[in-house]
Each structure stands twice: as structure tokens, then as C-alpha cells.
Amino acid sequence: MPIAEATAGLPLNIAHGWDVAERQWLAYAPNTPINTIGNLRHGQPLFLDLQADASWSQPRLRGAMPQAIGLPVGWSFVGWSGLHEPVWTALGEESFGPVAEAWRWNSNLQEWVSYIPGQSAQQLFAVLHPGDALWLRMRVDGVRWNPADGIADTDRAARLVEGTITYYHPSLAGGQMYCSGRIYDPQDLTVGAAVTWPCGTRLRIWRGERFVDVVVQDTGLLAHNQVDLSEAAFQQLAILPEGRVSVLIEVLSGPQ
């Protein structure tokens, strides 16, 4: 639907919409040549600068259901056109999943409310409503957003690489780790050492349907795509006598 038709009758000064793919703001001002928005898509969020108070909801768009759009790493401004849906269903609830955080403007309170996967949602952001506009901060590329269905991490398989895991020799307990400077604790589930990925990289290591999330906190004489884990992390996927195990490795986020 043309934005001019969708906003007809509003006391509109200018509308701004974020182009997720091009990472830039688009604009439309009635009765001027300014119109880089053109046609509205399903769930496209807008910032509206109005001359006076007014009520407006995006008209129901004609045609097929909305198509998913790819989300890059960083912030994207997206809209929700589905039914009332718990925020964790639409955005995911994994602490180190593709969505790092989400923010929505509450027009009644005139303040921003947030949701961080893996933590309790603020009461005012527990449910998505049709027409909600969101800022999403993404950790990884290859994730798609469907305005009616939410996050669809359909490209996760493309981010998985084959690798191996081993575990720290018991004699290394109490030593200082190169990247973080912390003391190595065999019971710390977050410890990983690697040379393939830089210090601070968050990795998810899969063996079948099981996984463990670690941070590269150390380095050493390691092979390509090899991750040396703490004993506790290794035992999330294997038993110690196995020694070396083939796995799939997924990068959740770059160095922090």
C-alpha cells in the first residue's frame, strides 16, 4: 500500500521508516517531493511526526502474508503484525540466542520497555500486540524476521562448522588464562580455549541435540576448529575418557 494512501487524513509533518537491508532511514512528507518510503510492507514500523494529537493504526495490507527479511548484526527497527503473542515465543528465550535484547516504546507511560532473552520480561513487554514497533539487537547474521511469526533462525545450519573438543589437563587447574586473566576452574562451564576464534568470542558447541555455551578465554597449542573445554563443560557433551570428540561449532557473537 502506498504510504500516502495509508496516512491520508493524518496531520502528518513527516514519517520516518528504517530500511533494515540498507541500514538507513527513509522519509515521507505529504505535499512535498520527499518520499523514499514508497509502499508500506507488512509490519513496517514508522516514526510519525504529527502536527496535533491523532489516532492511527496501519491499515490492513492487501495481498499475501508478509515475507521474512534478513536481520544483520546490530540494531534493526522492525514491526509486529501478528496476533497477540508472548514476547519469548516471537523473539526466543535463549540467553545466548540470536536476539540480544529488544526495546519497545510505551506510548501510555512515555518510556521505553525492554526484553532480554533468558531473563524475565518487563511486565509491560510480556506480550506483543499487532502494530508494535521494536528495536532488536542481533548477535549473529543469517537470522530472518517475519512480522507475523517472529524470529526464524533458518540459516543456523550455514553457521555451523565441524570441529573437535578436548578438555584441560587436570594439572592446569589454578593457572591463569591468557585472554581473560581469570584463574582456570575445572568446574566453570563457560571456559573454552581456541586459536580459530579471537578472545571473547561466544561459541555454542553441539553434539547431537545437546549443546554447551562457552567463551574463548584462553589459547594454546590447538588445532583449527578445536576447542579445549573445562572438565565441567566437556562433561555436558561427553564423558572424560572419550578425550577428543567431534562436534559442530556455532559462533554466537564476536569478541566482547
Image: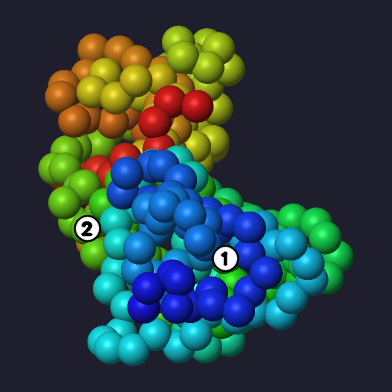
Mark drawn on residue 111: none
Which of the marked residues, 2 or 1, is nearer the chain's N terminus?
1
In the picture provided, is 119 more to the left or to the right than 39?
right
The percent position of residue 189, horizontal first and vertical second, equals 50, 41
Extreme residue toward the right, this view: 109
Secondary structure of the residue carrying numbered label 2: loop
Q: Looking at the figure, which quarter contains the N terminus? A: bottom left
Q: Nearer the viewer, residue 21 or 181?
A: 21
- Disc 2 marks a residue whose amino acid type is Asp
Q: Residue at x 26, y 18 (%)?
A: 195
Q: Quadrant of residue 182?
A: top right
Q: Residue at x 70, y 62 (%)?
A: 50
Discs 2/1, front: 1
- Disc 1 marks a residue whose amino acid type is Ala
The residue identified by callout 1 is: 133
The reply to whether residue 121 is visible in this rendering is no
Q: Residue at x 26, y 52 (%)?
A: 142
The percent position of residue 236, horizontal first and vertical second, equals 40, 51
The residue identified by callout 2 is: 155
Extreme residue toward the front, this view: 31
Secondary structure of the residue carrying numbered label 1: strand
